Image (cartoon, rainbow, N blue to C red):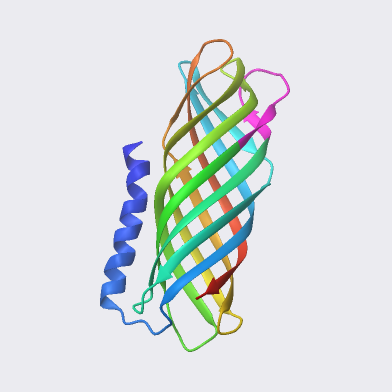
Amino acid sequence: MAFASSRPFVLATLVLLFATTTAGAGDSGFYLGASGALTGARTDFSHAGGTDQAEYDLGAGFSGFAGYRFESGLRTELEVGTRRNDISNIDTSIAEADGGKTRAETAFINVIYDFDNSSRFTPYLGGGIGVAHVSHDLVQRVAGDTVHDDDTMLAGQAIAGVLMKIDERWDAFADYRHVWSADQSSVNSGGVAVEGSYSSQSVNLGLRRRF
């Protein structure tokens, strides 16, 4: 848990260090944006009998954000989002049909650095720290029974992508995001204590308006 929650701080620190030693060339100011995502997810359910690894079908996500870009190329932003995936398989010795779904609602404070250049395309890297509210809906079979629970935990994400300038106000972007959470404490319907470690990966496409 400590290692997982420390990774976004490391990413943010590296971005800040790079930004202070590199001169950027770009417009500063506020911006708003939104994106849709194709998401993959995984949850490791740990319990006294071992670990049941849940894999999911591809799902969908959505996020909105507001931020500010500095002249140095550094950006800070607040992002809220949601992602949902259906169970495809649970690695367990119980020979019964798998099922259920998992939804994660997130809120992050992101630190991002734009690598400005002379083209219309601007690569960027960053990271975020925040919280994730993860809901497991009738996930089976975990420790021999069903998990139907939700919890809010610390979470982090890593970001890598590219912006494309459309005009003086609008940008399109595509990026990859890896989200992970601290352990979630749950109890399955049989009363067995279960800890779930959630992570997801997504490809995001969106638009951003500068002000």
Up the image or down, 133 lies above or below 139; here it is below
Q: Residue furthest front?
A: 211
Q: Residue furthest bottom?
A: 118
Q: Residue furthest top?
A: 190
Place of residue 183 in the rendered image (x, y in percent of width and height, measured from the top left) = 43, 32
Residue 137 figure quarter: top right
Q: Is residue 92 magenta?
A: yes
Residue drawn where x is 60% and y is 32% of the image: 54
Q: Is residue 13 toward the left or the right of residue 109 in the image?
A: left
Q: Is residue 65 magenta?
A: no
Q: Is residue 62 toward the left or the right of residue 134 in the image?
A: right
Residue drawn where x is 36% and y is 81% of the image: 24
Residue 169 figure quarter: bottom right
Place of residue 13 in the rendered image (x, y in percent of width and height, measured from the top left) = 29, 60
> Which stretch is magenta?
87-102
Q: Is residue 191 toward the left or the right of residue 153 in the image?
A: right
Residue drawn where x is 68% and y is 29% of the image: 100
The quarter of the rendered structure image containing the N terminus is top left
Place of residue 139 in the rendered image (x, y in percent of width and height, measured from the top left) = 63, 26
Residue drawn where x is 31% and y is 63% of the image: 14
Up the image or down, 205 lies above or below 137; here it is below
Number of residue marks: 0
